[in-house]
């Protein structure tokens, strides 16, 4: 097989190797930073036997984030009931809920001295409430040790779990994040267990439940979507009154996952950020390495500042 070539936007050329995988351009490469703070964060996570999406999803920013005492805790186990083609988290029959997990997380938050914490989870379609009560228990446990820590939750879509959002809303997180992930056309191949309009629906409904709550959503780019499709998703999210949009480059976790169709140039991300801001999002984070919880604490403070400036 001969080498193939593909032209990426801005006339940046990258080669396909002999198994037709696009080679990573320089702007997407990272180095894991192992310093004393990284080790401290890692030891605390291991001590409390917690899962993190940073490790489970092979996030490229783990070195930077853990070295700044930032970690996204993944609750409800590390086995998901869905099998999305972009996700590195294992699929199968989940373990029973660890009812001590909320207290463990609160203790870790206190030990690290966090000002802002991000809590996410696997999909738990096996649970009647989709895990909503456990999310609420974690929020209450953190609040019990500190009234000043701000809490961001990144939830699944709670498909067919009608009771989930009232439970979540009543627990009063500071930020409700649910990722739309990709454009509607790609849902059957990339998110086969999810529904595009269900994701829009929960983002809209949680804001209706609590209008003061910040809402957030994100997309992965490079899966074969068009610019026009991305802009349409932006408009749909604004119709759902979403405050904050994240756009990042999709990276293929393993050969069995969906392949990268394109590495989007950083200038393209800047152009999309400008378009998103024109749609009315309070905050937009768009770059190849942007992820849902990347710099989440600083972004939350900026969100607050912008909202207050509007009143």
Image: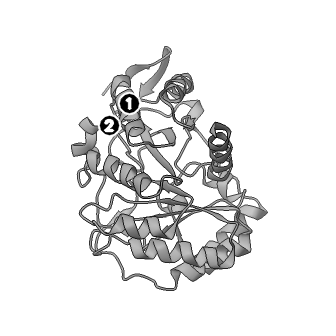
- 118 above or below 101? above
160 or 23, which lies in front? 160
Q: Which quadrant, please, contains the N terminus? A: top left
Residue at x-position 39% and y-position 20%: 5
> Percent from the top left, x then y, of residue 233?
36, 34
Question: Mark 2 vs mark 1: which is more N-terminal?
Answer: 2
- 246 above or below 45? above
- Label 1: how many Cα within 10 Å (few below 14, some 14–19, many 20+): many
Q: Which quadrant, please, contains the C terminus? A: top right
- Label 2: how many Cα within 10 Å (few below 14, some 14–19, many 20+): many
Farthest residue in the bottom direction?
A: 100
Q: Mark 1 sits on what residue? A: 230
Q: Mark 2 sits on what residue? A: 183
> Percent from the top left, x then y, of residue 238?
42, 37
Residue at x-position 31% and y-position 50%: 201
Residue contact between numbered discs 2 and 1, judged by CB atoms under 8 Å? yes
Marks 2 and 1, how far apart at CA: 7 Å
> Percent from the top left, x then y, of residue 135?
46, 71
Residue at x-position 46% and y-position 43%: 242
Q: What scheme was used to colour the molecule?
A: one colour
Q: Which mark is residue 289?
A: none
- 272 above or below 180? above
**Residue 141 location, quadrant:** bottom right
Does dot 2 land on a helix, a strand or a loop? Answer: loop
78 displayed left or right of 58: left
Residue at x-position 35% and y-position 40%: 182
139 or 285, which lies in front? 139
């Amino acid at each position: 097989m001969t080498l193939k070539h593909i032209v990426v936007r801005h006339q940046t050329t990258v080669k396909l190797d002999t198994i037709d995988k696009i080679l990573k351009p320089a702007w997407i490469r990272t180095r894991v930073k192992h310093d004393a703070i990284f080790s401290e964060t890692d030891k605390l996570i291991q001590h409390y036997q917690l899962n993190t999406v940073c490790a489970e999803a092979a996030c490229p920013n783990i070195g930077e984030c853990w070295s700044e005492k930032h970690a996204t805790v993944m609750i409800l186990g590390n086995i998901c009931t869905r099998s999305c083609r972009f996700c590195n988290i294992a699929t199968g029959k989940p373990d029973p809920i660890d009812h001590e997990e909320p207290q463990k997380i609160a203790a870790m938050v206190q030990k690290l001295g966090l000002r802002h914490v991000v809590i996410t989870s696997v999909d738990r379609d096996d649970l009647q409430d989709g895990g909503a009560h456990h999310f609420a228990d974690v929020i209450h446990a953190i609040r019990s040790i500190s009234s000043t820590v701000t809490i961001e939750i990144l939830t699944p879509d709670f498909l067919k779990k009608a009771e989930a959002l009232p439970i979540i809303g009543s627990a009063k997180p500071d930020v409700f994040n649910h990722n739309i992930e990709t454009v509607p056309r790609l849902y059957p191949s990339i998110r086969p267990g999810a529904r595009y309009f269900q994701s829009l629906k929960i983002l809209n409904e949680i804001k209706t439940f609590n209008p003061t709550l910040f809402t957030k959503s994100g997309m992965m780019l490079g899966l074969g979507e068009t610019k026009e499709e991305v802009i349409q998703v932006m408009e749909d999210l604004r119709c759902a009154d979403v405050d904050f949009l994240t756009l990042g480059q999709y990276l293929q976790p393993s050969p069995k996952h969906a392949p990268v169709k394109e590495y989007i140039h950083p200038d393209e991300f800047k152009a999309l950020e400008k378009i998103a801001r024109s749609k009315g999002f309070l905050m937009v984070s768009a770059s190849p390495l942007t992820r849902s919880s990347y710099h989440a604490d600083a972004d939350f403070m900026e969100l607050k500042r912008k909202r207050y400036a509007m009143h």
